[in-house]
Amino acid sequence: MSLCADLHCHSVYSDGTLLPAELVRRAVAAGVELLSLTDHDATGGLEEAAREARACSLGFLPGIELSTTWAERNIHVVGLGIDPDQPLLREGIARIAEIRLRRAEAIAGRLGRAGIPDTLNDALALAGPGTVTRSHFARCLLARGQVGNLQQAFDRYLGRGKPAHVCVVWISIEEAVQWIQAAGGVPVLAHPLRYGLSGAWTRRLLEAFRSAGGKGLEVISGPQHKSQTDLLADHAMKHGFLASCGSDFHTPDQRWCRLGMAGAGALPAKNTPVWSVWPEMRFAGEPG
Ligand code: AMP
Ligand code: MN
Ligand code: MN
Ligand code: MN
């Protein structure tokens, strides 16, 4: 029997708009049987999500999405089944929080020079308890009427090569894998086709991630074409990766990206699902 898993989504603890408990309730309503909350460089929402998941009898894996730099690209590594209290991971998260804060100051400086002053406090207020991300600056620009929608904020100001883009060096892929493994989790390469890499560079990335100790690949990430699923399923087989799937849900406002959309038995049968790592977990609808 296939499992409806969603192993990649965001709450207000990074750039999502839902509280963790609300996210869990919506996942249950959407038919999700196994959920992982994977906020950007943050674990603050995991306790609330785990508590609500227990109350709803939903399978839950504590997760995270770490920001790394590889070949001057921003590559995301998801950790599934992590212990958020593990010291190496905790110290690492604090280090990235510092990078994010310094970058936010620099972004605000650049926006100021582009004629949009005093955005730092707005972005920090919008981030609330969560990590401050470019999405918060995008929301600030939208609220001020500087752009007509969030995509425009990236296209005009925050995206790579735009006036308020700030290059930072995040952690390395090796560090991300080490921290996740130290915390007892499984490192998974997030959305491999969303980095704008050529086929050759994608293969290089997969090899680098594998040699760093990476174990899984998101074969399905949100809305994608079947040809992309087939390509990633082949990559997973060729490089010996477990297959993961996740919506990368951020907000109900994005109607094209819904909780559970990636995981209802859609992983190709030839792949080994990443949840085979936790044989002791029993999910609703599964025998035994
Ligand atoms: P950050 O990690 O702070 O650089 O923020 C990145 C987040 O901004 C991503 O996780 C996406 O949610 C969002 N994002 C990045 N690029 C774009 C884009 N071109 N359009 C819309 N959202 C984007
Ligand atoms: Mn995001
Ligand atoms: Mn990502
Ligand atoms: Mn994500």
Image: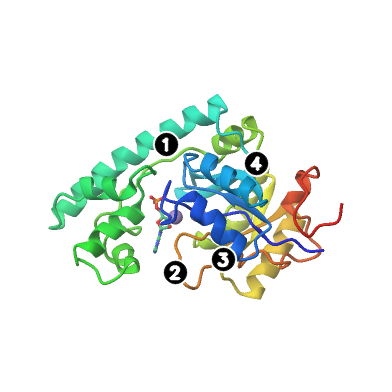
**Mark 2–mark 1 CB contact (< 8 Å):** no
Quarter occupied by residue 244: bottom right
Q: Residues within 10 Å of mark 2 (few under 14, many from 20)?
A: few
Which of the image's four quarters has the N terminus? bottom right
The amino acid type of the residue labelled 3 equals Gly
Q: Nearer the viewer, mark 1 or mark 4?
A: 4
SS state under label 4: loop
Secondary element at tag 3: loop
Determine whether, in the image, residue 274 is placed left or right of residue 97. Answer: right
**Is 114 left or right of 250, judged from the image as shown?**
left
Secondary structure at badge 1 equals helix
Q: CA distance from mark 2 to mark 4?
A: 27 Å
Q: Which residue is mark 2?
A: 254
Q: Residue at x 50, y 39 (%)?
A: 43
Mark 4 sits on what residue?
81
Image point (29%, 38%), residue name: 102
1 or 3: tag closer to the N-terminus: 1
Distance CA(mark 1)–CA(mark 3):
26 Å
Please give the label number shown on residue 222: 3
Q: Amino acid at mark 4?
A: Gly
Q: Are marks 3 and 2 in contact (CB under 8 Å)?
A: no
Residue 29 location (% of width, % of height):
60, 64
- Measuring from the top left, give residue 239's x and y in whole percent: 73, 52
Dot in front, 2 or 1 = 2
Q: Nearer the viewer, mark 3 or mark 4?
A: 4
Q: Position of residue 157 (x, y in %)?
A: 27, 60
On the image, numbered disc 1 is attached to which residue? 96
Q: Is residue 250 left or right of residue 284?
A: left
- What kind of residue is marked 1? Ile
